[in-house]
Amino acid sequence: MEFNHRSQLHDTIAALATPPGVGGIAIVRISGNTAIATTGRLLKKELRDQPSHSARLYTLYTPTGHTLDQALVLVMHPPRSFTGEETVEIHCHGGHLIARRILETLFHEGIRPANPGEFSFRAFMNGKIDLSQAEAIQDLIGAKNEEALRVAEDHLEGKLSLQIHDFQRRATDLSALFEAWVDFPEDDLGTTTFEDTTKDLQVLSNDIHSLITTFHSGKVIHDGIALCILGAPNVGKSSLMNALLGKDRAIVSPIAGTTRDVIEEDLHLNGIHCRLIDTAGIRETEEAIESEGVRRSRQAMTRADVILVVLDASRPHDSLMLMPIYEAPSSKTVLVWNKIDCTPCQETPSFDRQHVVRTSAKTGDGLDDLKKAIETIMWSAGTPRRDEVMITSLRHKEALERSYQALQRVNDGLKSSLSPEFIALEMREVLTNLSAIIGTNITEDILNSIFSRFCIGK
């Protein structure tokens, strides 16, 4: 849904801040210059004198005098509210009809329905939060695991913002020096100053690059990983999926080709969300449905973060069984020799793969080793520290990369005695991209893209 946030800032808005449906309590949130006065008309009370951040029990009425509900009404005077504006929250009895009737009455009194993310947008526009903190609110709501929740809380608290502000301050100092060089080219920077400048430039570049490298871990924490089970028919892929999930999710049969489509299920591995994908057995076939299943298996492999190539340890490995090994990228592949409980158990070579485990989906043997191998690939960039500031947003990563690349061009320009005008221009590029992360230099299109993804009432 697209809307022009800025042109509607003077409207008073209202929305349900709790999920729709039946519950103990529903919260109607109202924000804007007429929030207190309009709510007072529903209560037939003057709310202006009610202390900020206090809640009182009132009866709400329709314009014709009929009772709407008895509710706790929380008043927040500006600027001490989430949005920085007059804010009222009506904590009414839960239920779709009650909350809807209250909202309809408010709309009848001239208040407008809030757009998705409009409360958060107003908090951003009124300086209560910056853009990275606004995005953290949505991450907080959508967190899939405890680590994702922790990172979102860190961002909302402002830890990422502080890091970006530090980069901005240092880049501004460097930029001021280069701008002065443009204005007064006859003044030599001096040997010591030049050496200090290049050193400061390199340290800033390294620090920005270090933050960029946290994106892999941040993405794993925020989005989880796609874990694809690949292999020839009848090697135990579905049995392995069921064993990892701890339940019978996929049909298991001794008949080859039982799984003909991609089956997906959620799995939590040491607190990280995984999308576990069981695929059709890979082999050459003329049968149309099975052929489509094989195509989807290969497609799932290309999208996966970790691939489990399953082999059957109970029978000789022929070219059909080994085919998936050579299709899967070795850097993100775990070679899984399954059915080690069967006799006779064949030789289980590594085929030059770094991660090789032996398992029995039937008995559970080797599953712990398999999970450790998955985690090793998952954290290939290193296990993040709990106190580490990391980025989880592709938008942030791309802005930091543009800043880093501009700094590299500045460094190259200094080495090649590039005209200071061009060096100063590159430093402006650094500052522009850093500012975009926290929203001090951002386009309306980007704001619309970010806030329109929020739920209504947030």
Image: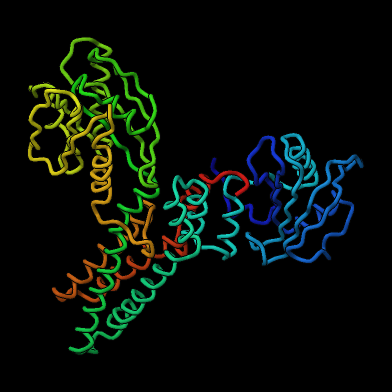
Q: Residue at x 58, y 54 (%)?
A: 120
Coordinates of residue 420 in the picture (x, y in percent) = 24, 76
Coordinates of residue 369 in the picture (x, y in percent) = 24, 42
The answer to whether residue 211 is above or below residue 28 is below
Q: Residue at x 78, y 54 (%)?
A: 73
Q: Residue at x 73, y 55 (%)?
A: 88
Image quadrant where residue 123 sits: bottom right
The answer to whether residue 415 is above or below residue 391 is below
Q: Residue furthest right?
A: 65
Q: Nearer the viewer, residue 260 or 449?
A: 260
Image quadrant where residue 227 sits: top left
Image quadrant where residue 388 sits: bottom left
Horizontal arrangement in the rendering, residue 326 relative to residue 181 (left or right)? left
Count of numbered circles on the image: 0
Q: Residue furthest top?
A: 287
Q: Quadrant of the N terminus?
A: top right
Coordinates of residue 353 in the picture (x, y in percent) = 11, 40
The answer to whether residue 452 is above or below residue 235 is below
Q: Residue at x 26, y 26 (%)?
A: 237
Horizontal arrangement in the rendering, residue 178 relative to residue 98 (left or right)? left
Q: Nearer the viewer, residue 250 or 453?
A: 250
Horizontal arrangement in the rendering, residue 15 relative to residue 125 (left or right)? right
The answer to whether residue 138 is above or below residue 76 is above
Coordinates of residue 347 in the picture (x, y in percent) = 7, 30
Q: How is the image coloured?
A: rainbow
Q: Nearer the viewer, residue 38 or 217?
A: 217
Horizontal arrangement in the rendering, residue 360 relative to residue 21 (left or right)? left
